[in-house]
Image (cartoon, coloured by chain):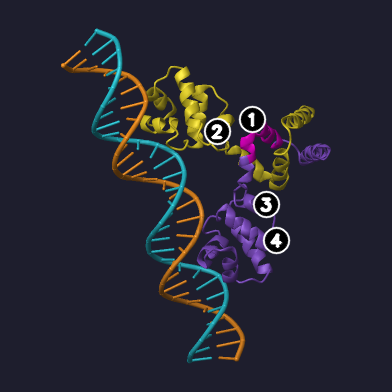
Chain colours: A purple, B yellow, C orange, D cyan
Amino acid sequence: MNPKKFGATIRALREQQQISLRKFADKVGISPTYLSKVERDEFPPPGEKKIKEIAEALGQDPDELLALAGKVSSDLPAIIQQRPRELASFLRSAGELSPEDLAKVTKYVEKMKRQG
Amino acid sequence: MNPKKFGATIRALREQQQISLRKFADKVGISPTYLSKVERDEFPPPGEKKIKEIAEALGQDPDELLALAGKVSSDLPAIIQQRPRELASFLRSAGELSPEDLAKVTKYVEKMKRQG
DNA sequence: CTGGGTGTACAGTGATTAGTACACATGCAG
DNA sequence: CTGCATGTGTACTAATCACTGTACACCCAG
């Protein structure tokens, strides 16, 4: 989507929690320099692991934050690889579904899981 | 899955079509040296683009071949990023579904698409 | 016995990814 | 006006990725 909003987003959230850049960098295990550049979208977002730590520290959904960074949690590709044809074609269809229809599908799956 | 079967698989298929390594390398746009190493699983599989050309040249499903290579077609992550929460949670559920149940879900989606 | 085709060994490379260290400037508290 | 915290500019770097070129040994046809 918008490829330049990751940094701005996490900066805003960090400022809401009143944490200094250095403290936050330290908490998520990166250098302050790097975080500074990332927050101003001067550097691309970090790797998956760091993004997940950032999400945790900021109380955000990791998948959402990864998406903002133009990434996807690596367990999802791993799942797709188990059944490439079915899941690939599902996803390509799902891309065309309305949000409501997608919600129906999700409910359908939930039901199946409950029934075992 | 088996992280060392990609090369062996494409070598077998290539030999079935009776194409020489050099000709095949040329056809898919890589060097013979490289193909040789890849086919003996001495080098990791090539990038997505080349794998798709290989799939085409061998008449295989690209998603299947990509999966063998431990990869996923990049349009799928792109789709997931449109609705990270829903699709991530769907996939994590789908990972636990039996093949039959997954087939049911796929049919359900197909039906929705036909109905618009 | 040479010339073309087969696959392979060895050695490297250019681009990208995911960062780091060090030094600096500004502001504000005591 | 010192001293400490804040964020930032400059300059690298180590590792990985996705390959390539050159040269070689082998086989077989003519």
Q: Which residue is mark 3?
A: A64
Q: Which residue is mark 1?
A: A85
- Residue at 53% across, 35% down: B69
Element under disc 3: helix
Name the mark nearer the viewer: 3 or 4.
4
Q: Alpha carbon of mark 1 to alpha carbon of mark 4: how far?
A: 35 Å
Dot 1 alpha-carbon crowd within 10 angstroms: few under 14, some 14 to 19, many 20 or more = some
Verify CB contact (< 8 Å) between mark 3 and mark 4. Answer: no
Amino acid of disc 4: Gly
Q: Which residue is mark 4?
A: A59
Amino acid of disc 2: Leu
The stretch in magenta equals A79-95
- Residue at 50% across, 31% down: B6
Quadrant housing residue D10? bottom left
Verify CB contact (< 8 Å) between mark 1 and mark 4. Answer: no
Name the mark nearer the viewer: 1 or 3.
1
**A22 is within the stretch colored magenta:** no
Q: Which residue is mark 2?
A: B68
What label sits on residue B111 in the rendered view? none
Quadrant of image for the N terminus of chain B = top right
Both marks 1 and 3 on one chain: yes
Q: Alpha carbon of mark 2 to alpha carbon of mark 1: how far?
A: 12 Å
* Chain of the residue on which disc 1 is drawn: A
- Residue at 51% across, 63% down: A34
The percent coordinates of residue B8 (x first, y second) are: 48, 28
Quadrant housing residue A30? bottom right
Q: Nearer the viewer, residue A115 or B116?
A: A115
Quadrant of image for the C terminus of chain B = top right
State whether residue B30 appears in this view.
no
Q: Nearer the viewer, residue A23 or A96?
A: A23
